[in-house]
Amino acid sequence: MKYSVEIPSIADADVVVLGGGPAGIGAAIAAARNGARTLLVEQNGALGGMMTLGLVMPLCGQSTRKGNSLGGIVGEFLTSVIDESKRYCDAQGKDHYVFSSPHVMKHVALRMALDAGVEILFHASLVDAVREGDRITQVIVSTKSGLGTIRGGVFIDTTGDGDLMYRAGEQFVKGSEPGVMRSLLGTGLDQVHDEDPAKATYGDYDHSGLMQPVTIMFTMGGVDVESAQPLCNLKVTYAQIGITKAEFLKLPYANTPGFVVDDTDEVPLPQGRVLFFQTLRPGEVVINMTRVIGIDGSDACDLTRGEIVCQQQVFYVLDFLRRFIPGFEKSYLIETADVLGVRETRRLVGRYVLTGREAIECRPLPDVIANGTYIIDIHDPQGRRKAIGGTIHQECYDIPYRSLTPKTVENLLVAGRCISTDHVAHSSTRVQGTCMLTGQAAGTAAAMAVALGASVGDIPVSQLQDRLRAAGVVFRNSAEVADVA
């Protein structure tokens, strides 16, 4: 793209990280600790992304299914969050920090980044990337001061939506691939886990480009959690909540998006179920029940539509819970998330595409740079089922370095939600702890590439693995490691 005005240079760095969510935090801290002059660019005024501004709790993927820590920056981060939550958030001596402390997480992330020597530019949004041959030379950002350019040696895309790789012309996909669900046959995850096994198959889910729905999280207080718990994570019928379908149809939100009445006896809810998590404070819960399907979070008009519908759903769900769910009779709204929760948009098509079958079967990969541990968790893009997926077969699976490296841009790495996976594997790798781990790997690799004067695809993978281990990262499912061309 050509611009008719002179755009001033506002910064330069060895490593430029675009996006200050969990992956960006891990990437920036790791790059700085490994000796690179590092700039972290974030469009909001705080770090953490969905982990903080989005109120997405709990923070998953920081330990294996058996509870063994994966270490690294995410382990350090959560240890600090526990300590600060006990000090400032009335944590009452408990350690269930993953449900409790988005505001503390902002503070801890900022402190760790500054302590590592990371430079931060808040309120700056990516506009474009300038690519010359096989390298990005600079990015253009929009700030309160106007447009500006940032030069860098290595760039890391931790935007979640793959904005930088897209602007640089790198290959990507959106959503599901044809036949991807049939590839799960025989894994044990080829049935929809919350429905009648005789009926619930993936047969009608063979479409390209289906993306998981969007959500806005919110918190409520004054909840009698003990009374509410029996209905948590369950679909509910009209009989269970003591009303008829005709009475439900009189509610002001009946037949609005997410509340469309069908011919079953199940109460229509956007997420399909009642779902909440208790925080550290008595009577406080975080609610995950809004859902809008058919939204492309990388499209401005779609994103706006998703925001509008989800913001309306927050108060509809709030009203529903207070009216009909035992334990919520005296509840009240505390806060809603500042940003819309987008689960899936662009994914890199990198040097290796991690598949859902590999994740489920936990196949060892020689260039492992992080482990994933979360379940396969596809929020139904068609909105008919509460979730699709299930548990991986072992403690964790390997995520390869090649899934962070593009095919054509030699000084770009991708970490977090938009790494190179298929639709099924992505439903696990997208969670915050895993994103921070892939971010740490990308930041470490970027600093190595700068120091060696090498392309990101040419750094010695065994040396990268050694550095990650030295920094406390634990590989719990790795094969005998060797350099991968």
Image (tube, rainbow, N blue to C red):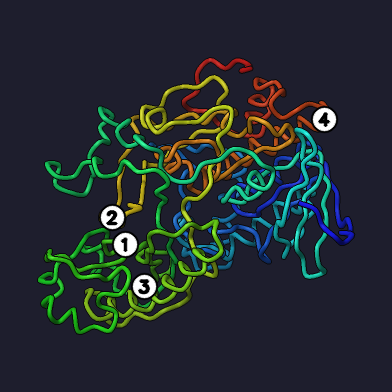
* Residue 236, quarter of picture: bottom left
Residue in front for this viewpoint, 405 or 129: 129
Q: Which residue is mark 3?
A: 283
Q: Earlier in the sequence, mark 1 or mark 2?
A: 1
Q: CA distance from mark 3 to mark 4?
A: 52 Å
Front position in the image: 263 or 34: 263
Mark 1: which amino acid? Gln
- Looking at this view, is 380 or 278 the one in front? 380
* Spatial separation of the CA atoms under disc 4 and disc 2: 47 Å
Amino acid on which disc 4 is placed = Ala
Instruction: Say the numbered circle drawn on residue 271.
Output: 1
The local crowd at label 3, few if under 14, some if 14 to 19, many if 20 or more residues have their Cα within 10 Å, is some
Q: Earlier in the sequence, mark 4 or mark 1?
A: 1
Q: Which amino acid type corresponds to the residue marked 2 in the rendered image?
A: Lys
Q: Mark 2 = which residue?
A: 386
Quadrant that contains the C terminus: top right
Residue corresponding to mark 4: 451
The CA distance from mark 1 to mark 2 is 6 Å
Residue 182 locus on image (x, y percent): 29, 33
User: Mark 1 or mark 3, which has the lower sequence index?
Assistant: 1
Q: Are marks 1 and 2 in contact (CB under 8 Å)?
A: yes
Residue 266, relative to residue 192: is it above or below?
below
